[in-house]
Image (cartoon, helix red, strand yellow):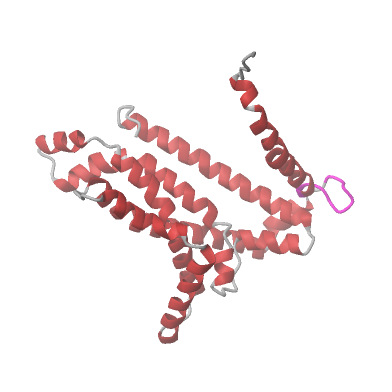
Amino acid sequence: MKKIHFSRSSLGIPYGIFLVLFVVFPLLIILFYAFTDGQGRFSAENFIFFFSNGKTLGTLAYSLGIAASTTAASLLLAYPAAFILAKGRFRRRPVLLMLFILPMWINFTLRMTALKEILTVIEKNLAYYPFMNTVIGMTYDFLPFMILPVYNSIAKIDDSYAEAAMDLGAKPAQVFLKVMLPLSVPGIISGVMMVFLPAMTNYVVLDMLYNSTYIMGSLIGSYFSAYDWHNGSLISMILLAIILGFSLCSREFAGQKEERTGGIRI
C-alpha cells in the first residue's frame, strides 16, 4: 500500500481556505460598505460624518478611557499575584494557579449576574457610577487574561539574574525595578493587548450591568441593528485601524526592550 505524504504547504491549505472565507472576504465586504453610499458609489461621507460628529468622537474617547482604566486595573492586580505565584515558594503552585483561572470556567452570564447583585447592594449605600461599574465588570472578566501571560513571563526568568544583582549590592527594590520588571515586559505587553483590545468593544458587560453608556462595540452594533451598514462598517474599519496601530506600537516597544536587555527574550 502506497504511503501518503503531505507537505507543509498542503497541510496549510485548509487553514488558508478558512482565512479567505471567514476573515479576508468579510473584511472586503466591510471595506466596500465603509466607503460607499446607499447606491454603491464611492463616497467619503461616512468618514466625514464620523470625525465631524461629537457623539461618535465622544464614544471613541469614552471607549479609550474604559479600555485604559480596565487595563491599568488588571495590571495592578495581576502583576503582584503573578509574581507571587511564579517566584513564591509554594508546594502546590499549580493548584493556586488554577484558582485564578477557575473563574474562566464559569459561564460569563453567571459571573456578570453575581457581580451585578454585588454592585447593586453597594450602590444602595453609595452613588451610581456607570464608568466605575464598567471598569469593575471588565476587570473582573479580563483579569485571568492578564495574569497568565505575566505569570509565564516571570516564571521563565532565571533566578540567577536576581542573585547576581544582589551580589553586586542591589537592594530588593532595585532588583525588581532593574532586573525583574524589564525582563517581564514581554508578558506585560501580551497581557495589555489581551485586555485593552477587547475592552474597547465588549459592550455585553455594559448591557448586563444596566449601563446606559455606549462604547465602540455598542455603537457599531446599534448601526448594524438599524441596517446602516455603511456607518457601522466605517466605524469597524476605524476601530480595526486603532487596534492595528496599537499592536504595531506594542511590538516596537517590545523590540526596544529586548535590545536594552541584551537580546534576552523571555
User: Can see residue 69?
Assistant: no
User: Can see residue 160?
Assistant: yes
Question: Residue drawn 61% across and 66% down?
Answer: 214
Rendered view: 2 above or below 92: above
Tell me where residue 143 sits by quadrant.
bottom left
Instruction: Give the residue furthest to the front.
Output: 1
Residue 182 placement (x, y as % from top left): 30, 40
253 displayed left or right of 14: left
Quick one: quadrant of the N terminus?
A: top right
Rendered view: 204 above or below 19: below
Question: Residue drawn 79% across and 61% down?
Answer: 227
Rendered view: 1 above or below 138: above
Assign the magenta stretch its main secondary structure. Answer: loop
95 displayed left or right of 11: left
Question: Residue drawn 43% across and 77% down?
Answer: 118
251 displayed left or right of 261: right
6 displayed left or right of 145: right
Quick one: quadrant of the C terminus?
A: top left
Judge whether residue 182 is colored magenta.
no
Residue 170 placement (x, y as % from top left): 13, 40
Question: Residue drawn 54% across and 67% down?
Answer: 109
Residue 199 placement (x, y as % from top left): 52, 57
Residue in the foreground of this view, choosing between 208 and 135: 208
Instruction: Give the residue furthest to the bottom.
Output: 125
Residue 59 placement (x, y as % from top left): 61, 63
Judge whether residue 35 is colored magenta.
yes
User: What segment is highlighted magenta in the picture?
Assistant: 34-42
Instruction: Give the residue furthest to the right.
Output: 39
